[in-house]
Amino acid sequence: MLTQFVSLSVPLQPTPAAMERAIAQSLQAYGEPLRWAITAVDVESQTAAIEAVVTVTTRIA
């Protein structure tokens, strides 16, 4: 198992619960999230900058 640092941008959602779901769904593409944080919000573009640490399962051949 490896850990990776991921930075991405997620569109702002109307409620905190919807925002959390959108972040979790976006992070699944990179691996299993260990922790994440909203590090910036761009009101003009209506996006949030997310930084996360995810685990990636590796297969040994």
Image (tube, helix red, strand yellow):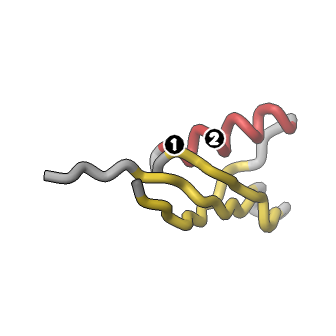
The percent coordinates of residue 6 (x first, y second) are 55, 64
Query: Which residue is drawn at the image coordinates 76% and 40% (left, top)?
Result: 19
The percent coordinates of residue 17 (x first, y second) are 81, 32
Q: How packed is label 1: few (under 14 Cα within 10 Å), some, or many (20 or more)?
A: few
Residue 25: image quadrant is: top right
Residue 13: image quadrant is: top right
Query: Which residue is drawn at the image coordinates 49% and 53% (left, top)?
Result: 55
Relative to the observer, which residue lies in front, 2 or 22? Answer: 2
Residue type at mark 1 is Gln
Which residue, given by chain and number where applicable, does mark 1 sit on?
28
Which residue, given by chain and number where applicable, does mark 2 sit on?
24
Image disc number at residue 55: none
The percent coordinates of residue 59 (x first, y second) are 24, 49
Residue 49: image quadrant is: bottom right
Residue type at mark 2 is Ala
Q: Secondary structure at mark 2?
A: helix
The quarter of the rendered structure image containing the N terminus is bottom left
